Amino acid sequence: MAFKKALSSLIIALPAVLGLVVSPRATCPDGVNTAKNAQCCSLFQVREDLLNNLFENECGDAAHGALRLIFHDAIGIDPQAGGGGADGSIATFNETELTFHANTGIDDVLDTLGPFLQKWSHILTPGDFIQFAGALSLTVCPGAPQVKFLLGRPAPKAASPPNLVPEPFDSVQKILARFASVGFSPEEVVALLSSHSIAGADDVDSSIPGTPFDISPAVFDTQIFINVQLRGTLFPGTSGNQGEVQSPVRGTLRLQSDHLLARDSATNCIWQSFANNQAKMQSEFGAGSSSSRSWVRTLRNDLIPTPPPFTGTASFPPGLSHADVEQACATAAFPNLPTQPGPPLVVPPIPQADGS
Ligand code: HEM
Ligand SMILES: *[C@@H]1O[C@H](CO)[C@@H](O)[C@H](O)[C@H]1NC(C)=O
């Protein structure tokens, strides 16, 4: 369905009129890359700039922010309320969209990405830039799925309507209904939340910015699905923050929404199914993207490099084991994983990107 295709742009692209002229592959002016048209040639230099100078080739704060930005731009569409989805409105109309409570912290992301968006605005529309940066952000994160990038979103016309971005204090029912209105199943919602494997919060507990959601925020692994299923025992900073519940490891923060999705009968077995299945997580993360419209042409895959592989093993954090799992799925047991060696962790904060 159309809205779903629009939001699948989370991972690839929005249906948009595409002006690409298809011609035989030619060598770009740089003498190195080849592409089917000049616009594609120009994207290689944008790519190098973003990888080297924005992300600094690390799965750090700037990369995490670029991924979150894709979501907060793309989810701004609704069959009733309207909105342009992945159109870049969150950047162009930031004066409106940044007043939405659920976009707290996006100001820092735009401070970091904005200069690059401006610098390349003669080549990419704001919508295309956000999708391109988000797709590239995954390529610096080991274990991330490889995603495609499609070009051709027109400039945004207006700000997104309010109240379309989920909040960490929303109920499961409300979150699933919001996603369902744009065509996403509960399985697809949980798969998308694997993004929280390379994520943290600056503003949920503002006394401890950069607090990760799992023990390995620079690796796109299944640790988020393990961490969130463990019994919460502590707050990493202060207690009483809206949208936060107790986490099992010092230095990590748990969102109430993740906690409830891991436990609600609508999603708990799905959540658990990713805990020990890197391949399933990778393939389902981009699943909605396969049905893009035929008149949107895929760029060369090598524009988006293959992310480094995940080389670890799904495991419990040091000091924790299957006994610490809060079993929620009624039809299958949580997998029995090895425990990482060593004393209990204190996970360090994610260093903040410049300008935030
Ligand atoms: C149930 C829906 C969701 C809720 C309630 C939610 C909520 C949040 C919250 C509260 C934060 C922390 C913000 C801060 O304080 O700095 C966050 C971070 C993040 N979220 Fe989500 N999120 C959801 C879905 C998604 C999806 C579908 C993606 C996919 C792209 C995503 C990607 C991220 C990333 C990458 C970060 C980390 C940003 C950073 O570390 O700078 N989230 N999310
Ligand atoms: C944010 O909005 C202002 C004012 O409309 C605009 O000048 C600026 O370019 C926007 N920032 C980005 C990153 O698009």
Image (cartoon, rainbow, N blue to C red):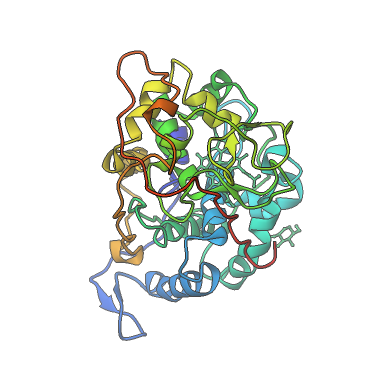
Residue 77 as seen in the image, left or right of residue 183: right
Count of labels shown? 0
Q: What percent of the width, then of the height, locates residue 249?
A: 53, 40
Residue 185 in view = no
Residue 162 as seen in the image, left or right of residue 349: right
In front: 185, or 64? 64
Displayed quadrant of residue 268: top left
Q: Which residue is drawn at 63% across and 29% down?
A: 81
Report ligand 1 position as a quadrant. Answer: top right
Q: In this view, does 1 lie above or below 160?
A: above
Residue at the front extreme?
Answer: 343
Q: In this view, does 348 lie above or below 280?
A: below
Q: Which residue is drawn at 31% across and 61% down?
A: 306
Q: What percent of the width, then of the height, locates residue 132?
A: 46, 59
Q: In which quarter of the image is the C terminus?
A: bottom right
Residue 60 in view = yes
Residue 251 as seen in the image, left or right of residue 216: right
Q: What percent of the width, then of the height, locates residue 21?
A: 34, 64
Residue at the left extreme?
Answer: 24
Q: Quadrant of the N terminus?
A: top left
In front: 218, or 125? 218
Displayed quadrant of residue 116: bottom right
Q: What percent of the width, then of the height, locates residue 9?
A: 44, 45
